[in-house]
Image: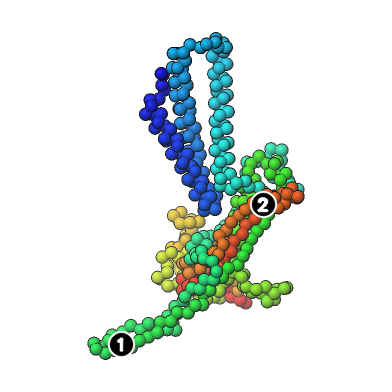
Amino acid sequence: MSKFLTDAERKEKEEKRNDLITRAETVVNTAKAEKRELTPDEMQELAEIRDDVRKIKEFLKLDDDFREMGDSEKKPDPEPKEDVSVDVKADRECKEKRAIEEQERQAFEAYIRNTLMNTRDTNLTIEDNGAVVPQTIADKIIRRVYDICPILEKSSKYNIKGTLTIPYYDESETAINVGYQTEFTQIASSVGQFTSNVTLTGYLAGALAKVSRSLIHNSQFNIVDHVVDLMAEHIARFIEHELLVGTPANPDAVPPTTAKVLGLSTLTNVVTASATNAITADEVIKLHDAVKDRFQTNAMWIMSPATRTALRLLKDDMGRYMLQDDISLPFGTSLLGKPVYVSDNMPEIGAGAGVIYYGDFKGLATKFSENINIQVLRERYADEHADGVIGWFEFDSKVENAQMMAVLKMASN
């Protein structure tokens, strides 16, 4: 029997193929269990696995062909075969190979997509988005990019249902006294008292968008994935806004609104600027020093892009610009040696606005009662020839340790 591979080599190839398929299933099932999309690294790994599996299948197919040829040499054909030219046969085999390869690729990608998200649909209308659906649609959609800082990542996160009460020890009111003592004399006691003034509950938030099925069918790319990505981005921007600015009660609104997530809006470690429309170098230094050295290691600045531009023009007493370019830091800029993050959610310079945060933002507590989940509703809007993309989450955020952070507020008038 003719062999392209020895029995040992064939067994090794088959085992490697099975291991690769098992690895692919593990990657997909892990993402599914964590209720998230595949990361770019995971997608790259799955693509490499797909190519490796295809190559192994081709090796095994060649081995099968060689074994078949060996058997045919021993057993003469009972009937004469059709005389097929070499070129025609090679062309036919090439087409069959390409068809099998494409079929396997589609099956592999369908397996990954369907296992991870089942099927997903979109959320826009042909009438409102005609520019997205020409006769030949582009491979990408260009949208406005928003600057988002890592405030959620840096905060102290709690995944707990119900109400969370965080004990707070106020040393200014009830300090533990330490001093010299005389042997055989009773030590005077002091009271260390914890207060429970940081309580996190949960506020439900959600977003819903409907997608025209005509838009889905007329698109040459996966517009459903695009809308799901947009939903996730908008949720991230909303959460960041609540962490930085919050939603305090507004009795003057019509109708009056109650407080929701407060985030950093209640921060009591405040440096007040002397003007309503300008920041001085001295005020930046005061804000930096408002955070004790113990919390400086992981400190960073957060401000709006316009505020960062204003700080670029500030100089110290030696005439040096305070804001420095540093490619080793995120966003490539540093202020007094600490990274500068910008966010479009931060207020601009104006009367009474809190325009710059500085410190270690682990002092901000963030609690998620319900993890962020995004679902596609296929049947709910069937009578509208549309599908829905809906996102739900429940969270709360408050200042946990005011010593770790400070805010620069502009003068009120």
Residue 377: mark in rendering? 2
Q: Earlier in the sequence, mark 2 or mark 1?
A: 1
- Residue 249 vertical placement versus 232 (above, below): below
Foreground pick, 234 / 14? 14
Foreground pick, 382 / 92? 382
* Quadrant, the N terminus: top left
Taking the image as shown, residue 241 lies to the left or right of residue 299, namely right
What amino acid does circle 1 point to? Ile
Q: Give percent across and percent down for residue 322.
A: 48, 64
The residue under the point 57% across, 24% down is: 95
**Quarter holding residue 222:** top right
What amino acid does circle 2 point to? Leu
Give the residue number, with chain letter if any, for mark 1: 187
- Residue 96 vertical placement versus 124 (above, below): above
Q: Give percent across and percent down for residue 70.
A: 44, 17
Residue 262: mark in rendering? none
Q: Give percent across and percent down for residue 138.
A: 65, 41
Disc 2 vs disc 1: Cβ atoms closer than 8 Å? no
* Quadrant, the C terminus: bottom right
**Direction left: furthest residue:** 183
**Residue 372 in view here:** yes
Q: Give the structural element (helix, strand or loop) at label 1.
A: loop
**Residue 124 in view here:** no
The residue under the point 54% across, 52% down is: 36
Q: Give percent across and percent down for residue 108.
A: 54, 38
Foreground pick, 265 / 84? 84
- Residue 83 vertical placement versus 11 (above, below): above
Q: Give the CA separation, mark 2 to mark 1.
A: 68 Å
The residue under the point 31% across, 84% down is: 179
The residue under the point 72% across, 51% down is: 381
Q: Give the structural element (helix, strand or loop) at label 2.
A: strand
